Image (spheres, rainbow, N blue to C red):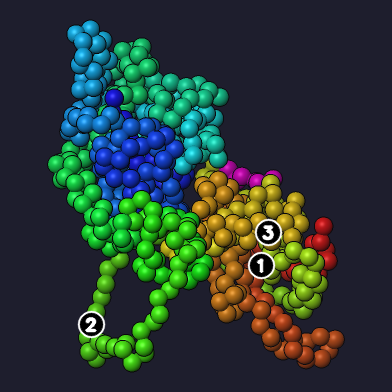
Amino acid sequence: MATIINMPRLSDTMTEGTVAQWLKKVGDKIEEGDILAEIETDKATMEFESFNEGVLLHIGLQEGDSAPVDSLLAIIGEEGEDVSALLNGGAAPAETTKEETPAAPAQEEAPAAEAAAIPEGVTIINMPRLSDTMTDGTVATWLKKVGDKVEEGDILAEIETDKATMEFESFNEGTLLYVGLQEGETAPVDSLLAIIGEAGTDVSAIVANPGTSAAPAKAETPKAEAPKAAAPAPAKTEAPKTAAAPTATKKVSAINSENGRIVASPLAKALAEEKGINLAKVVGTGEGGRIVKVDIENYVPAPEAPAAAKTVVAAPVGEISQREEKNSNMRKAIARALDKSQTENVNFTISLDVDMDNAMASRAIINQLPDTKVSFNDLVVKASAMALKKHPQINTEWTVEKTIYNEHIAVGVAVAIEDGLVVPVIPFTDTKSLTQIGAEVKDLAIKAKKKKLTPAEMSGSTFTVSNLGMFGVDNFTSIINQPNSAILSVGGIKQKPVVKNGEIVVGNVMNLTLSCDHRTIDGAVGAAFLNTLKQYIENPVTMIA
């Protein structure tokens, strides 16, 4: 029987996804574990693998198209199977797959009829896939109970995945009629999790057949979104035909002739970026002309044309020119987070200069050790963790009813990537040595550049460090990374005249600026923290463990 594949939620804050690249086309045989597509979320571009086997019968989104989580992404089933009923909002593809004997249809009709009898306004909520590798989930906590009113956007439960415990929000409104799993219970992805509908609706028929509850839920997703999905269905059913057309071109070139997208594996893209290779000049040897790792390793650039042959065309003086570029999901998420931070926080900033002479000398000695590389940013991260232990008020989170004191310390390190900014987190930062912090920060930064960070690696910070010193910036002010109460902005090391032992000499100075949420942090508390931080950085020997 055909299986509907919905847009997965691949990060804890993802509300919609964009198909960056399809790695399979309609008609291809799919094995469990095959990579179907690369999905761009608000945080990274992730490979999305199939948990089903069969033939790819339908593609619901073309490359570059975006859609909300749980929207129709693809359909997998038996070769030649009719999926028109699913595309039009139906829920009983089983009828088309088992027609050999009179007895078989009679047995198959019962669940199909029961699925069709789902009361109007009732929505089946299945166990979501909250990470790209999640196969089952555990209900850690229910935040709603049966009988509670549920609004769109309300948090229904906290779901423990293979990577983190994430909040699962409702995309529907109504009354919570049924809970399929109790706290602590585990079930596979797409198992019956809950039912939402009008108060007093009888859902006993659905509950009595848990083996078939997943089928109505999957069919209900496109059905519930009929105004959005049903109308363009005819156009989408034609899409696979045209998507398969440029196959012959792809076998000799990695550029899709329809949309100009370069088809390459994530590893090949990362390797090409590392080596400075233009993917448009590489011929792919993978399936459909896809560029793979070996193509990058074996690439030999063609000789450049003589300089005289190059022509420079200058735009007319005074010509007005514009171009539009679609906002990525990551950029949209950054905008939402910054807007929320600026709207909700009551910010103030304080700054001071740090004498870096001792830090520079200490770092030079530390980096003489074999296989050791510690940056100035690593010194700041370590010093921040130690200062947070002495000033726990900085390590807090504000809520309307209470202030949360984090007794653990997890410093987030802002990393700039091509599409925006991500904040990988060093858990239990205060327990780690300078060299351990340096190694972790380097590893996370590399993964960030390659868009390989997992949601768990970007969650749970209690304090954030943002460093623009490597760009020649003297000082700046950062926007607080919620739910943190503070963020540290680190400038570059500059030579300035300073007074030492009564004499004016040339010193190495670095500026630190602390942005604080005044709801949790008062000015004196922020100043005390900044001075403790200054003492640690100016005396690195106090941080060596």
The residue carrying pointer 1 sits among few (fewer than 14), some (14 to 19) or many (20 or more) residues within 10 Å by Cα, namely: many
Reading the image, the residue beneath label 2 is: 320
- From the viewer's perspective, is 528 left or right of 321? right
Residue located at (30% from left, 40% from top):
28
Q: In front of the other: label 3 or label 2?
A: 3
- What amino acid does circle 1 point to? Asn
The residue carrying pointer 2 sits among few (fewer than 14), some (14 to 19) or many (20 or more) residues within 10 Å by Cα, namely: few
For marks 3 and 1, the one nearer the N-term is: 1
Answer above or below: position of 86 versus 334: above
User: What is the x, y in percent for residue 317?
Assistant: 24, 91
State the mark number for residue 377: 1
Q: Quadrant location of the N terminus?
A: top left
Q: In front of the other: label 3 or label 1?
A: 3
The span from disc 1 to disc 2 (Cα, nearest Å) is 42 Å
- What amino acid does circle 2 point to? Ile
Reading the image, the residue beneath label 3 is: 439
Q: Which residues are magenta?
A: 402-407
The reply to whether callout 3 and callout 1 are in contact (CB within 8 Å) is no
> Can residue 124 be seen here?
yes
Residue located at (19% from left, 46% from top):
241
Residue located at (37% from left, 63% from top):
283
Q: Quadrant location of the C terminus?
A: bottom right
Answer above or below: position of 231 versus 357: above
